[in-house]
Image (tube, grey):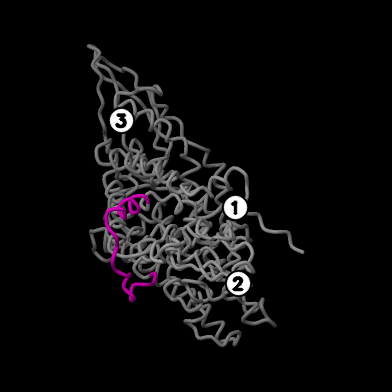
Amino acid sequence: MEPPPFDLLRTPGVGRFLRWRHSRTFLQIPLFLISLAMIAHGLFGPSLAPKNLATTLSWIHFRGLLILVLLCAGNFFCLACPFMLVRQAARFLFRPRFAWPRNLRNKWLSITLFVLILFNYELFGLWASPWWTAWLIIGYFASVLVVDGFFKHASFCKFVCPIGQFNFLASMISPLEVKVREPGVCEPCVTKDCIRGTRATTSDLVIIQRGCELALFQPVKAGNMDCTFCLDCVHACPHDNVGILSRPPASELMTDPRRSGIGLFSRRKDLAALSIVFTFGALLNAFGMITPVYMLERSIAQALHIHHLAPILALIFLVFLVCEPVILLGGAAWMTRLCGYSRRGVLSLAVRYSYALVPLGVGMWLAHYGFHFLTGFLTVVPLVQSTLASLGFPIFGEPQWTLTGMPKSLVLPMEMGFLFLGLVGSLTVSYRLAEEDAPEQPCVALAPWAVVSVILWIGAMWLVTQPMDMRGTFVSG
Amino acid sequence: MAHPGMAPVLVRAGESAPGSYVGHLQFTMAGDWVILVQGALANGQKIDRQVDVKGVLPG
């Protein structure tokens, strides 16, 4: 008999805190205050990025901690999301009246926004611009208020938020999942509070505890996709039957059950496209920070006589996010079909196996964001010293600008380790899918998809060993 | 370095002639750099100047 999985909610300290009804708000308030400080400093503070809270906390600390927490635990940043605190406060004032449009109930809008953020990050050199970074945060707060002000449930989280989609995908390799403890307990349940919410005994229309706003019905929920770890289901379940349980990382990618609120992964072209953008975007985002990208930009500028960065970047994005996936995944799917390992069509195969790239994508994001965080996490110390001094409160003394983080020589092996783990994860998921498609020849059926993973891994390894070139300016000609 | 989180290069400039100060620094990576000059005048007044050095090429 298998031992019961670890349940974070049953631990004495953290578990007790998370079971507390106001734990989410408690976590959101400090992040909201930090967001306000970042906006103020971004708009009115020093224009030099390393001396500004907006740029340093956004592009070094937030991104680094986000991906590390996703790797080690789960989607706890969505749990503590400060944007949702503002939304919640706004909903005391006005109630949303509309349902999210049916033709937008997919990930295409959020994919577009995700790509736009990656594009503008390169175009405007967001990492070097406190002003633009502050406006990005303001834009986020405004978007949440507009979307969730008009539309019911968690429309922003499920269909709009690019950070949320990033977290949903990365959390598929997390070791923790919000899940039913004992499936048998749910079978006789008729109230379904985990999704409908707990209703008042006096009136069925009065909700005293919200259920899942992302339409995930716990008994048939599978995996972390679309789960914000808000714990509404935990608080709503009258049988205390929802926990935060351990599971093998990436295990949810190895099966394709019908998932509550999602359906079948293999039929969701939008989710497959999101996985592709997530994985190839990870390589593209890292490519934007190394010396060869500037050589490439100059070559394109000279060859096509273009002197503006936007069309050159658009071309690079097109190659990375469209041409490369079409060639690699299309080629592998075509090979699989040609060899008769599956009866599925080429597009259907490409969709099915695109999810197998997610572990590699997470590995690349980890290597990239982990690098910046680990080599620069101490920069927050002189930054706080300098900010307080500039406000007339030099309580922590002179800024120690020499404080940075771990040496690059120590971080590089860790980056390579992350990438190796990503490769192993992608190969394992591909193998499990191939095993299902061709039970008699799984290794042969795996081959085309293994080639895709290995090509991407080699590309990622090359990227992390390149010299960095953090240029916000475009030098043409 | 214009990117946050990167190690700064700190150099003390020495007086080579009256009113002239010389310091040597090495850009440790390619990209956009910012030189911040801080000093004090004879009357004690503090001065700060910023010089942008864009597009440092790899060595």
Mark 2 in CB contact with mark 1 (< 8 angstroms)? no
Report in which chain the residue with disc 1 lies: A
- Return the mark for residue B53: none
* Residue at disc 3, secondary structure: strand
Dots 3 and 2: beta carbons under 8 Å?
no
Q: Residues within 10 Å of mark 1 (few under 14, many from 20)?
A: some
| The quarter of the displayed image where residue A248 is located | bottom right
Residue A298 visible to an observer of this rendering: no
Secondary element at image label 1? helix
Let me know if marks 2 and 1 both belong to one chain.
Answer: yes
Label 3: how many Cα within 10 Å (few below 14, some 14–19, many 20+): few
Which residue is denoted by mark 3 in the rendering?
A: B36
Question: Which portion, as a residue range, is magenta?
Answer: A85-107
Residue type (three-letter) at the residue carrying disc 2: Glu
Q: Position of residue B7 (x, y in %)?
A: 43, 36
Q: Are marks 3 and 1 in contact (CB under 8 Å)?
A: no
Q: Which mark is residue A417?
A: 1
Q: Which residue is mark 2?
A: A187
